[in-house]
Image (cartoon, helix red, strand yellow):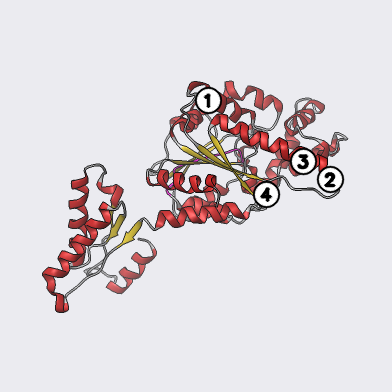
Amino acid sequence: MNLVRESFIRDVGKELLEENVAIFAGAGMSAGAGFVNWSELLRPIAEELGLDVEKESDLVSLAQYHCNANGNNRSQLNQRLIEEFSQDAELTENHEILSRLPIKTFWTTNYDKLIEKSLSSLGKIADVKFTTNQLSTTKPKRDAIVYKMHGDVEHAHDAVLTKDDYERYHVKMDQYLSALKGDLISKLFIFIGFSFTDPNLDYILSRVRVAYNGSQRRHYCFIKKIELEEGESEADFRYRERKQELFVNDLNRFNIKAILIDDYSEITELLRVIEFNYKKKTIFISGAAHEYGAYGEKETLKFVHRLSGKLISEGYKVVSGFGLGIGSSVISGALEQIYMKGNSTINDQLVLRPFPQSSSGSSSLRDLWTNYSLNP
């Protein structure tokens, strides 16, 4: 594993414990779920204009040409967006991992609803925002905010698609860009499936760099290495390879570290490592005891007390229930160490999940236990 990957695992792991990680998802992240990229979205539009989408690099201008040719009417563009991004796609493992982690901020240029769907599948409440008016409202009990920079598939007529849309964006969405700027300053971003060709993001990154030159927060992105294409000359390949090297180096101006990958599956592998490292910092200790055997009640509970305190002192989060005898010792050991450290709140290192211990209602204790295990 190279140094950038090691830094990524270390830095993201540390910031996750502070709930200080944000995701910026581009089209590449949704492509894994089967959604089309921009080229495929605009292919029939290009054909109508007599152009070959494979030969076009400025797809935003292509969308604008379509509007120009139709008297500034973009109904066909809106319909294409609805047709392609309203499909019910399967979540990718990347979506699922990110939703399980304590990440509260998601930014995306995608129109689909995969991020919201992934959060919802875990019982998390997503506060989705794609207009400036939505910034002033807060969804009750939200677990994460999902900022959709280019709009939402269910509001295709307002989606950012054409050159006109991009040119007006910094005026129309000024408060929205301010929110992004604030997050880029205060959080560690992971850019996934993003090509860094979006002028709005470039606009913000440039201003953050100028304002915090030499002290910007570090971010990470994934970039697939250039590959030799079929029929491509060695000289052309080397040219594209050199251009990628220069691009990766230029990202350092914004303190964005690029992780070069040979295959997109490597992203999933790294996210698995991140999730494993995060989860291993949480220890579940619980149980109940009526008899204590040869050790006796006093020595057993003293051991549980010391064990719980030691885990807290080593930076672990302890999860426990109120099991008879054992539970109270876990809690007291943890609380004693937390108060001694004095540098964290109780919720940062101790999570309590009381277990049903008796039934006085219509449900049996067995039923209560079954329901609780499914919905803790």
Q: CB of mark 1 within 8 Å of CB of mark 3?
A: no
Q: Nearer the viewer, mark 2 or mark 1?
A: 2
Spatial distance from mark 3 to mark 2, Cα to Cα?
Answer: 10 Å
Spatial distance from mark 1 to mark 3, Cα to Cα?
Answer: 30 Å
Position of residue 20 relative to residue 332, above or below, is above
Q: Is residue 1 left or right of residue 156?
A: left
Q: Nearer the viewer, mark 1 or mark 4?
A: 1
State the SS at label 4: loop
Mark sitting earlier along the chain (3/4): 4
Label 4 Cα crowd, 10 Å radius (few <14 / some 14-19 / many 20+): many
Q: Position of residue 113 (x, y in %)?
A: 58, 46
- Residue 188 image label: none
* Residue type at numbered disc 3: Arg
* Residue type at numbered disc 1: Arg
Q: Which residue is mark 2?
A: 232
Q: CB of mark 1 within 8 Å of CB of mark 4?
A: no
